[in-house]
Image (cartoon, helix red, strand yellow):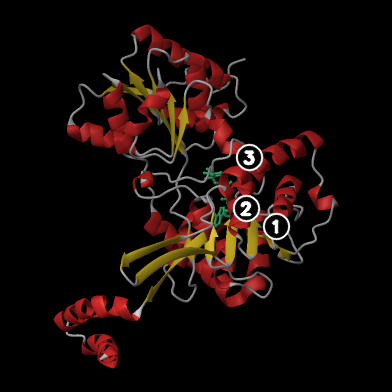
Amino acid sequence: TPKPGDGPISMRTSDLTSVTPAERAQLLRRPVLKSGEMIDKVKPIVEQVRQSGDKALLELTAKFDKASLTSTVAFPPYTAESMKVDEEVRKAIDVAYANIRKFHEAQIDKTGLQVETMPGVVCSRFARPIARVGLYVPGGTAILPSTALMLGIPAQVAGCKEIVLATPPRSDGSISPEVMYVAKLVGASAILKAGGAQAVAAMAYGTESCPKVDKIFGPGNQWVTAAKMLVQNDTDALVSIDMPAGPSEVLVIADHTANPAFVAADLLSQAEHGVDSQVVLVAVNLTADHLASIEREVDEQAHALERVDIVRQSVSKSLIVKAPNVEEAIAFSNDYAPEHLILHLENARDKIPLIENAGSVFVGPYTPESCGDYASGTNHTLPTNGYARQFSGVNTQSYQKHITSQEITASGLGKLGPVVATLADCEGLQAHANAVRIRLKAFQ
Ligand code: NAD
């Protein structure tokens, strides 16, 4: 029996060969994020946690998550009962953990670098872990062990000493056992049972029971994102964040070789995330029949999904962009800077050199985004909203900072010193010049 709102699930279509520059710019835009407005809304919550610590956390968790807790933080060892997961799921988590760990371990800068810039002048750079990190794993009702893996593994392999994992509790006060199991795998040193802006504030400032952290990672809804943006600008908090986050998105480029069912499935796997998800299909010179079969697949597969109502809303805001050739399709994608980019193209791998902006790329017909979302090894916490122009996704180096160092010999200073003294004189910084000249004089 048809339900209200039933009907075709379809996307809008534009053609790159006929759009004006203004229309093209419009196609590249995401729904407006009202970050300023949200920051004003989270301010009182952040302030409440800062002033009243654990007491505020308990009150806010009762209010927003409908959970009445007696304590807000759990420390290891976590009970076996709290980590009890289905055997199949546990095995799947273990495989995902191994792959993600392998890829993130390989990113560790073990040796650092050393360069002699002039004879006797040696500059070096080496990495150190950020000591205390906070990982936000979204969702009170949703089970998101994948996000716990993606945020926790690089922290673990980078060697962070304190790993605080925050997630909103379920109404009975518990955390999903899958997330607890991952928390143990990645060596989380504390579990903060709180969500939203209050969790971010607790990790940024610390409370009686929640350790203060140096950097906060992780996706979340607009309350989480706004709180992260607020605390990173407060010098009292002295905390940084991974990146500004927004609703998840995918851009799929498909040519004549693309399997319509695969393309549709990839578009829908993104569309089911949430009503604000962004889905774009760039169709490279497809025949009308080919495009119609993709659209038919989208409609049919969408109707078979449990989350069809979410998909209906996100797909209705999404677009098909027709491009005359692969070069123009990739140029559009580079301007859009998608979080996820899927290439359903002939010889897809050969097109990678053309890609300038993307969070993560999925190459060829047998590489669904889902694999990167869960278990291939790459990270799924990626820049959205066009931030792939200037941000990388979360990676092991996100949990490290680099320290530079230099050592200069007496003869090195003999050559470099006069250069520095001249530049210091030029800038009028006499004491700087003096620190060099006093040594040069000592040589004579
Ligand atoms: P969430 O954990 O982000 O937010 C839940 C919290 O929001 C609650 O604990 C509450 O404190 C706060 N909140 C809700 N309504 C509020 C209100 N009116 N006032 C103050 N605080 C309020 O979980 P969510 O809401 O389910 O959102 C999850 C988000 O994370 C989605 O946007 C989803 O797309 C995103 N996500 C992204 C990824 C990724 O890797 N990109 C993965 C998973 C989820």
Which is nearer the N-term, disc 3 or disc 1?
Answer: 3
Q: Are marks 3 and 2 in contact (CB under 8 Å)?
A: no
Specify the label residue 199 is tagged with: none
Q: Amino acid at mark 1?
A: Gly
Tag count:
3
SS class, disc 3 = helix
**Residue 76, quarter of the rendered image:** bottom right
Does 262 sit above or below residue 435? above
From where the camera sits, is residue 7 visible? no
Residue at 76% in and 39% down: 90
Label 2 sits on a secondary structure element that is helix
In this rendering, position of residue 158 left or right of residue 177: left
What separation in Å lies between label 2 and label 1 (alpha carbons)?
Answer: 8 Å
Q: Is residue 419 above or below residue 361?
A: below
* Mark earlier in primary sequence (3, 2): 3
Placement of 182 over or under 71, stated as above or below: above
Viewer-side residue, 66 vs 116:
116
Picture residue at 61% right of the left edge, 44% below the top: 102
Identify whether 193 is placed above or below 233.
Answer: above
Residue density around tag 3, few if under 14, some if 14–19, many if 20 or more, within 10 Å = some
Q: Residue 152 — which label?
A: 2
Mark 1 packing: few (<14 Cα in 10 Å), some, or many (20+)?
many
How far apart are labels 3 and 1 at the CA level?
17 Å
